[in-house]
Image: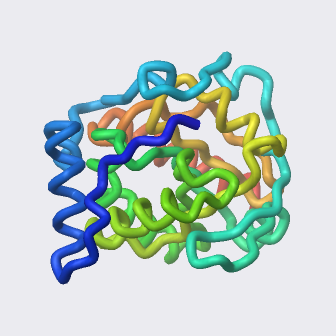
Amino acid sequence: MLRHDVCDTTRISSLLEDKLESLEKEFPGCGSTPSAGESVDASTAGMTAGANASSEATKFPSFTGKDLDGNDVNSDELFSKNKVTVMNFWFTTCKPCVGELGDLEKLNQELAEKGGQVVGVNSFTLDGNKGEIADAKDVLSKKGVTYKNIWFKSDSEAGKFTSNLFSFPTTYVIDQNGNIVGDPIVGAISSAEQRAALDKLIDQAIANSEQ
């Protein structure tokens, strides 16, 4: 995973603002509302990109990992406790990824009423890199995000799944049994069409879970 030093590490009172300002300078517009379906190509961002990870997958790879605060997370527990899990793959220097974080926070609040949640996976934080985790947490805090973000080993099946994503952000909908529902939403969920497609997948996942 390519390391991008885009955040000011000087620890001052305005740390979060400095980090995002630095992000904005290197990636103009980062953090602003992305255009409909806007995405960043994985190879352009310096990450290995394989075929679309959804092409054959029906069940999300099981994993054990941690959230960004160091708490243990495992897929069986994560998925089984939710009627629907919306898993959003992003990285810290991705303009459309950061731009949609606020909307995903609102979605997480909506899903809480339906027995679901949003879970973020920042691809830079795989393997628990402390510097990348700190950068991700700062951006998430600045954007007001409270939903869980997690990491797992890059050489795990879930890590390989992540490395095969061809574009970011990419969002998967997963039912209570750990099954991927439909095709992923590729690009920022910033248009009515994208949101309608996501809502349809969410409803299907909930229906699957209630059977």
Q: In this view, which residue lies farthest toward the bottom?
A: 13
In the rendered view, would you say 19 is above or below 188?
below
Q: Horizontal and vertical percent for residue 63?
A: 82, 55
Q: Quadrant of residue 80?
A: bottom right
202, 62: nearer the viewer: 62
Q: Is residue 76 left or right of residue 96?
A: right
- Asked which quadrant contains residue 194, the reply is top left
Q: Residue furthest top?
A: 51
Examine the rendered structure and indicate whether residue 103 appears above or below residue 43. Answer: below
Picture quarter with the N terminus: top right
22 shown above or below 190 = below
User: Can residue 211 be seen from the camera position used here?
Assistant: no
How far from the left and from the top, in percent, is residue 95? 28, 40
Residue 96 vs 45, above or below: the answer is below
Q: Residue at x 24, y 70 (%)?
A: 16
Towards the viewer: 29 or 118: 29
Q: Residue at x 40, y 32 (%)?
A: 187
What is the x, y in percent for residue 140? 37, 66
Which quarter shows the C terminus? bottom right
Q: Determine whether, in the image, residue 207 is placed left or right of residue 116.
A: right
